[in-house]
Image: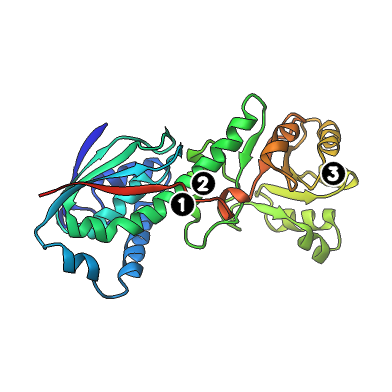
Amino acid sequence: MSTVILPCAPSRPESGLDPDLAALLTQAGLDPLGVADLARRAVEEDLDGGVDVTTCATISEDAVCSGDFTAREAGVVAGLRVAEAVLSVVCAEAFTVERHAEDGDRVEAGQALLSVATRTRALLTAERSALNLLCRLSGIATATRRWADVLEGTGARVRDTRKTTAGLRALEKYAVRCGGGVNHRMSLSDAALVKDNHVIAAGGVAQAFFAVRREFPDLAIEVEVDTLPQVHEVLDAGADLILLDNFTPARTAEAVALVAGRALLESSGRLTLDTARAYAETGVDFLSVGALTHSVPALDIGLDLRARH
């Protein structure tokens, strides 16, 4: 457990966040400016140009309290420092946080994750925005950990997709890393993925591959295939990574034998936790799971006020 006093805004850098908090976000591969901007937008959306009418009516301006962000169910936590960033946006003066857990930790129901002491109005106004992000990211980390646990001992890793919430991609992919998964490309520009519509438009899988290679000679290229003859074709063309779309485990094993280590292989489609290990044991490098970010339930986390001063 660590106790940290976060200072008021005038002593903070450009992001508006405490320098130590900004450093922690940077170490996690997150942009402090981006996180701070998201936190501000989340709070502004919740207030909609007004004030927290219920809190302002029921709680005096000078009231101070302590509260615990507490797991209501077991899972893997992610986004604790993001929640702190939301608190930083709302709290107009210094406040204290006690960190009981770190992102990526397995937590149990009833476990306190983060304790905060600050103005009561500020804490309650920030509560929902902080929890929305914390619960969402922890749900992704929890789901990813289930896949990572199933794949443990194989050479395969579970990998995300671009099926992310608009504006939250960096955070959601961070949550995948917290859960033990690995990230696919972050954007359309950092790697090429030739899919079925590209193949149709280009007139064939090899034609699509060579078109990308000519235009972007130094870029890694992944090609989606749905037949073994296409595996032959893109392997001969020089694909760096081949995505096996809707292959059965038996056909996947054939593809692994055919490729024989000359390219990385990724399985996609028809994947469930029940079948994941069968695919992994064929020797593929990755299992692509869009559900990690597009349809996982949030982890239940709440804020419990402990004291009122």
Which residue lies at the image location 75% right of the left edge and 30% below the top edge?
A: 283
Within-10-Å neighbours for mark 2: few <14, some 14–19, many 20+: many
Furthest-top residue in view? 153
Which residue matches tag 3? Answer: 231
Residue contact between numbered discs 2 and 3, judged by CB atoms under 8 Å: no
Marks 2/1 in contact by CB < 8 Å: the verdict is yes
Q: Quadrant of residue 8?
A: bottom left
Circles 3 and 1: CB atoms closer than 8 Å: no
Query: Residue 298, image x and y in percent?
Result: 48, 50
Residue at far right of view:
229
Task: Residue under label 1, please give it.
Answer: 136
- Can you give x and y, in whole percent of width and height, for residue 182 in the image? 57, 40
Amino acid marked by disc 2: Ile
At horizontal 26% and vertical 61% (from top left) the residue drawn is 125
- The amino acid type found where label 1 is placed reads Arg
Q: Where is residue 293 in the image (x, y as percent from the top left)?
A: 56, 51
The residue mark sitting in front, 3 or 1, is 1
In three-dimensional space, the C-alpha distance between marks 3 and 1, rounded to whole angstroms, equals: 37 Å
Q: Earlier in the sequence, mark 2 or mark 3?
A: 2
* Res 293 seen here: yes
Q: In which quarter of the image is the N terminus?
A: top left
Q: How crowded is mark 3: few (under 14 residues within 10 Å), some or many (20 or more)?
A: many
Mark 3 is on which residue type?
Val
**Quarter location, residue 164:** bottom right
Q: Name the quadrant containing residue 108.
A: top left
Residue on which disc 2 sits: 140
Please tell me whether residue 42 is drawn above or below residue 78 in the rendered image. below
From where the camera sits, is residue 16 visible? Answer: no
Relative placement, left or right, of 88 versus 34 is left
Q: Which circle, 2 or 3, is nearer the viewer?
A: 2
